[in-house]
Amino acid sequence: MSTSKVYYKGELRTEAIHILSGKSIMTDAPLDNHGKGEAFSPTDLTATSLANCMTTMMAIGAEGRGISIVKMETDVKKAMSSNPRRISEIIVNMTIKIEPDTESNREILEAIGLNCPVAKSLHPEIQQNVSFIYE
């Protein structure tokens, strides 16, 4: 079974439909590349997917270890380079509050996040700068 179907909607915009759920995501070319910037760009989704994957995997890991995630919010930034135009860096700043908040639990969750499937799937030339801020 396919994962998704993508339709070109004109004006540098696409709609991706998730086959299993029927949910959709719109993308738009970014302002700096002839687009309107009215939705996530494909490279925005790539950068954001890293944070989504880290969050999901850390939550799964926490559940299996009796760690309660009280708060987990992530700010994502991406940097682009040219020649070729590509993502050069993804900056992930994750604010997290866990219970019990121990050094061991922090190390476990950070290792899970840093080794999530998206992190391991990104090209090695893309710098992944991740920071964990505990409350």
Image (cartoon, helix red, strand yellow):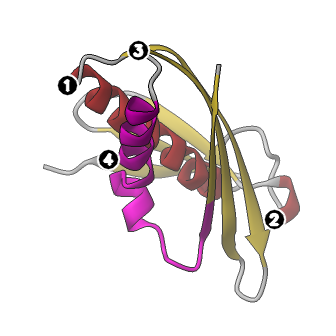
Per the rendering, the mark at residue 4 is 4
Of labels 2 and 3, earlier in sequence is 2
Looking at the rendered image, the disc whose residue lies closer to the viewer, 4 or 3, is: 3
Alpha-carbon span between mark 2 and mark 1? 43 Å
> Outermost residue toward the front?
103
What number of labels is visible? 4
Neighbor class of circle 4 (other Cα within 10 Å; few <14, some 14-19, many 20+) is some
Pointer 3 with pointer 1, Cβ within 8 A: no
Counting from the top left corner in percent of width and height, residue 89 is at: 68, 65
Counting from the top left corner in percent of width and height, residue 94 is at: 62, 35
* Residue underneath mark 2: 33
Pointer 2 with pointer 3, Cβ within 8 A: no
At 72% across and 78% down in the image, what residue appears? 85
Alpha-carbon span between mark 2 and mark 3? 46 Å
**Chain part drawn in magenta:** 103-128
Amino acid type at circle 4 is: Ser
Observer-nearest of 69 and 74: 69
Residue 41 seen: no
**The C terminus: image quadrant:** top right
Counting from the top left corner in percent of width and height, residue 95 is at: 63, 28
* Residue underneath mark 1: 64
Amino acid type at circle 3 is: Pro
* Residue underneath mark 3: 100
Of labels 2 and 1, earlier in sequence is 2
Looking at the rendered image, the disc whose residue lies closer to the viewer, 2 or 3, is: 3
SS label for mark 4: strand
Amino acid type at circle 1 is: Gly
> Outermost residue toward the bottom?
83
Pointer 4 with pointer 3, Cβ within 8 A: no
